[in-house]
Image (cartoon, rainbow, N blue to C red):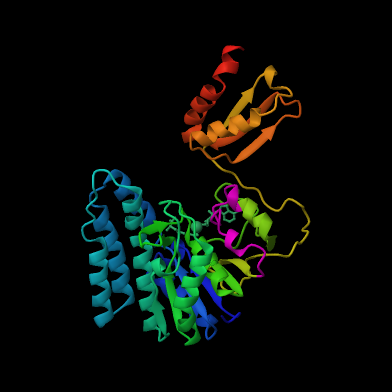
Amino acid sequence: MPRSTQVHKFGGASLATAEAMAHAVSIVLAHRPGPIVVVVSALAGVTDALLDIATKGLRGGATALRRKHSALARALFTGASRKKLISRVDETFAELKVPRKMTPAATDSLLARGEQMSARLFAAALEQAGCPVEYVSAADLIITDDTFGHASADLARTERAVRKTLGRLLARGVVAVVPGFIGATPDGQITTLGRGGSDLTATLLARALGAREVSLWKDVPGVLTADPRVVPDAHVVPQLHAREAAELAYYGAKVLHPRALIPLGKRNIAVRIRPFANPASTGTEISQRSTLLASPVKAISAIPGLALLTVTGNGMLGVPGIAARTFAAVQHAGVSVSLISQASSEHSICFTVPSGSAERARKSLRETFRGEIARQ
Ligand code: ADP
Ligand code: ASP
Ligand code: MG
């Protein structure tokens, strides 16, 4: 696989209008003729709308989605390709018959339509611009477990599938356009990689292809020192070590999917967060280099909607196994812990869980320590 391969991922905000789509196409063309894989998200707002349809069964939602995509197709294409794309839009969003109780698997198949449609539109736009291009189904590339809604890729299987499917295309100079966010189980059931998962699709493909660089084109000038919606005068961090970026993503910086850097490990594949509005800018480089900036603290992130649980009592001092039982109880409740602290006196253990799961975790803890609580 040629080391010169580049992966370019365009987020929803970068595809919202016909002008934006044309701009994204011009970015891809500017990086030719080297081997290029393009990953696209659903158009802005589409995944949220599909999720509303899945969870609330919102009638009329499908019509709005059909209109949004048809309008884009009409603005971008003429003649036969316009006709073909509009009928594909109609098929994709025609009647989204939602059963009363959606299974996680059915929800993923529904959500996948956003990326499938935007990738079709993007591939057609590249073709119209005279670029050799092929739409490649994500189900043929990203092989995952069956944790619907939050699937994890099987790296070895994904690597084999990607090399087999994309290798020959890229060697022929064809640009591959792949829907982000989506994978499939080995038996072909559609899964999704969690919200924001297109970043992860891009890094999974880059790993499998041994790519040189992954560009994530975003509506911000790069990774900023804080979320610009909270801190308007946040500024760009020019370079981050992969570990630093991974921590920021894990701890809530929405700019990067929390698991996006995992596939790259210590591989020498640079990830760039780049401003869609200004392709000449270098944005933020995420790589294996450590640089010291003026401040050792490079950025601040925040996760909303967490609850802090505290297990405390005098009887905990020097007693082996309290921590193990505490976290076994939380695991038993199926709750994931994001941060842990234990005071040096061993009188208390604090940890955070999503607020929505806090009561479940608390019940399980009270059950586990029922004897100790009764004995005070
Ligand atoms: P995409 O759909 O292209 O993946 P996202 O909306 O997921 O884009 O991520 C970009 C958004 O992340 C920005 O618009 C910004 O509001 C938010 N964000 C949160 N924290 C940061 C940060 N530290 N730096 C940059 N953007 C951030
Ligand atoms: N469209 C999906 C989402 O909104 C995936 C992505 O944008 O990366 O979460
Ligand atoms: Mg995102």
Which residue is at a point 51% across and 78% down the rendered structure image?
Answer: 36
Q: Is residue 309 magenta?
A: no
Which residue is at a point 57% across and 39% down the rendered structure image?
Answer: 337
Q: Is residue 222 visible?
A: yes
Q: Main secondary structure of the magenta part?
A: loop
Q: What's drawn in magenta, residue-wise? A: 249-268
| Quadrant that contains the C terminus | top right
- 132 lies left or right of 31: left
Which residue is at a point 36% across and 66% down the rendered structure image?
Answer: 116
Instruction: Indicate the position of residue 265 as horizontal and vertical percent values.
Output: 64, 62
Q: Say if 294 sits above or below 204 in the image.
A: above
Dividing the image into four equal quarters, which quarter contains ligand 1? Answer: bottom right
Q: Is residue 27 visible?
A: no
Label tally: 0
- 115 lies left or right of 264: left
Which residue is at a point 42% across and 62% down the rendered structure image?
Answer: 183
Nearest the camera: 135 or 239? 135
Instruction: Indicate the position of residue 186 as horizontal and vertical percent values.
Output: 40, 62
Instruction: Indicate the position of residue 289 as horizontal and vertical percent values.
Output: 73, 65
Nearest the camera: 102 or 250? 102
Instruction: Indicate the position of residue 285 as horizontal and vertical percent values.
Output: 65, 66
| Quadrant that contains the N terminus | bottom right
Residue 216 sits in quarter: bottom right
Q: Is residue 262 magenta?
A: yes
Residue 375 sits in quarter: top right
